[in-house]
Amino acid sequence: MIGGIENVSSYEEMVAGQKAGPGASSELGQDSFLKLLVAQMQHQDPLNPQGNEEFIAQLAQFTSLEQLMGVNTALGDIYAATTSMNNASMTQLLGRDVTAYSDDIPYDGDGPKMLHYQAPEDVDRMTITIYDADGKVVSREEVNKVEAGEGSWEWDGKDVHGVQAKEGTYTVSIKAFGTNGNALEVQNLLKGMVNEMSYATGAPVPFVDGIEVTIGAILKVETSSTDADKSA
C-alpha cells in the first residue's frame, strides 16, 4: 500500500517543478492537497488499496487545518484593526496633564522643582537622593513623618555644594522606612504634560515633558490647564 507522500515519486517531481517557479509558496494549499490525494489514488497498489477511512482521515485533518488557518487570519485582522484603533486613541493623550510612575524627572535649570511620590503607608523617615545623568549624587534630603498616599517635596535646584544644577534629566531614588522600622517602597511620580507620542517600536510610547514613560505607568490623566482656559 502507498499511504505517504514519500512514495508518490511522480507527484514529488511535479511539486518540485512548481516550487521552482517564481513566487512559488512553500505552504500546502487546498488545490495542492487535493492533487496529492488524487496522485495517491492513482499510484496506490491495486492489490492493496488504501482504505476509505485513511482518505477520510486525511481530508478531516486538512479541513481542520484550513479552519485554523482561517481563524488565524481573522485574528490577525482583528489584532491589526485593534492596534490601529489603540494607536489613534493614544494621540488623545497629547497635551494632557498626567501623573505617572517614573524615576526620571526633567529640570529646566531655573529655581526650585517640585518632586512627587506615592507612599503605600505612613512613613517614619525617608531619604530622597537625586542623581545626574552620570550617576553622581546631586542632592540628598531627609524627610520625616510622611503620610500614606501622594505627597511632594521641593528641591531647591541646587547640588550638595549649593551650586545651581544644570538643565537636564535627573533620576530620583527614594529610600523609606515605616513607623515600625520596616523598609517601604515609596515610588517617585512624574507630573507633567504629554508633549510627544512615539510609534517607533510599533506601540504608542508617550513622553511627559520629554521623559519617556509606558502606557501602563500612567496613573491619572487630567484636562490640561490650557484646555481649562479655553473652556472657561
Image (cartoon, rainbow, N blue to C red):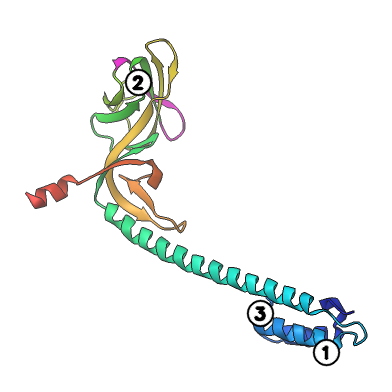
Residue tagged by mark 3? 29
Density class for disc 2 (Cα within 10 Å; few <14, some 14-19, many ≥20) is some
Asked if one can make out residue 107 in the rendered structure from this viewpoint, the answer is no
Extent of the magenta region = 132-146
Image quadrant assignment for residue 61:
bottom right
**Which comes sooner in the sequence, label 3 or label 1?**
3
- Name above or below for residue 124 compared with residue 173: above
Residue tagged by mark 1? 42
Q: Main secondary structure of the magenta part?
A: strand
Density class for disc 1 (Cα within 10 Å; few <14, some 14-19, many ≥20) is few
Q: Quadrant of the N terminus?
A: bottom right
Contact between labelled residues 1 and 3, with CB atoms less than 8 Å apart: no
**Which comes sooner in the sequence, label 1 or label 2?**
1
Task: Identify the disc placed on residue 121.
Answer: 2
- The residue under the point 71% across, 81% down is 33
Density class for disc 3 (Cα within 10 Å; few <14, some 14-19, many ≥20) is few
**Residue ranking furthest to the left:** 232
Q: CA distance from mark 1 to mark 2?
A: 79 Å
**Residue 48 percent location from the top left of the image:** 91, 82
